């Protein structure tokens, strides 16, 4: 719920008026401007549905990686599709994971066909 409420994202050219270079931004629930209720309401609703249905939740960066604008790059669509395919077909259920200490996220150590440096 922390990542959902935080909504760490970026303002990018083509989607934001006057923006030429991507700039980090926060948008609660990744759509704050369109939400009539407090973000915690939506986080609670999401948590209830995850619990009720026993859903697995995946956090997948489809945006920027590898450094600030001019250094990093957008995540490859090919890589994003490969990771999603592995989620859907159950391959990532078989993967070995390590825990990121601060956020307590489980990160796969290896995904076939994906450079481990981006995981």
Image (tube, helix red, strand yellow):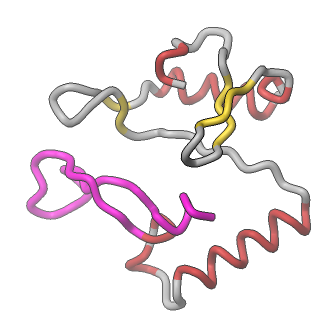
Residue 94 vs 42, above or below: the answer is above
- Residue at 59 percent across and 40 percent down: it is 101
2 on left or right of 84: left
Q: Quadrant of the C terminus?
A: top right
Question: Residue 61 at x, y = what percent?
Answer: 49, 39
Question: Residue 52 at x, y = what percent?
Answer: 90, 68
Question: Residue 109 at x, y = what percent?
Answer: 66, 19
- Residue at 79 percent across and 21 percent down: it is 95
Q: Quadrant of residue 15?
A: bottom left
Q: Nearer the viewer, residue 96 or 102?
A: 102
Q: Would residue 46 be counted in the magenta stretch?
A: no
* Residue projecting furthest to the top: 113
44 on left or right of 53: left
90 on left or right of 10: right
Q: Nearer the viewer, residue 34 or 107?
A: 107
Q: Which residues are magenta?
A: 1-27
Question: Residue 49 at x, y = what percent?
Answer: 81, 70
């Amino acid at each position: 719920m922390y990542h959902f409420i935080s909504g760490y994202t970026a303002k990018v050219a083509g989607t934001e008026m006057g923006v030429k270079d991507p700039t980090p931004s926060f948008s609660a629930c990744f759509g704050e401007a369109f939400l009539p209720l407090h973000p915690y309401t939506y986080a609670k609703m999401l948590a209830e549905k995850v619990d009720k249905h026993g859903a697995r939740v995946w956090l997948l960066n489809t945006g920027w990686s590898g450094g600030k604008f001019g250094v990093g790059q957008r995540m490859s669509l090919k890589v994003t599709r490969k990771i999603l395919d592995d989620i859907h077909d159950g391959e990532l259920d078989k993967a070995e994971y390590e825990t990121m200490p601060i956020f307590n996220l489980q990160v796969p150590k290896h995904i076939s066909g994906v450079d481990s440096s981006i995981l």
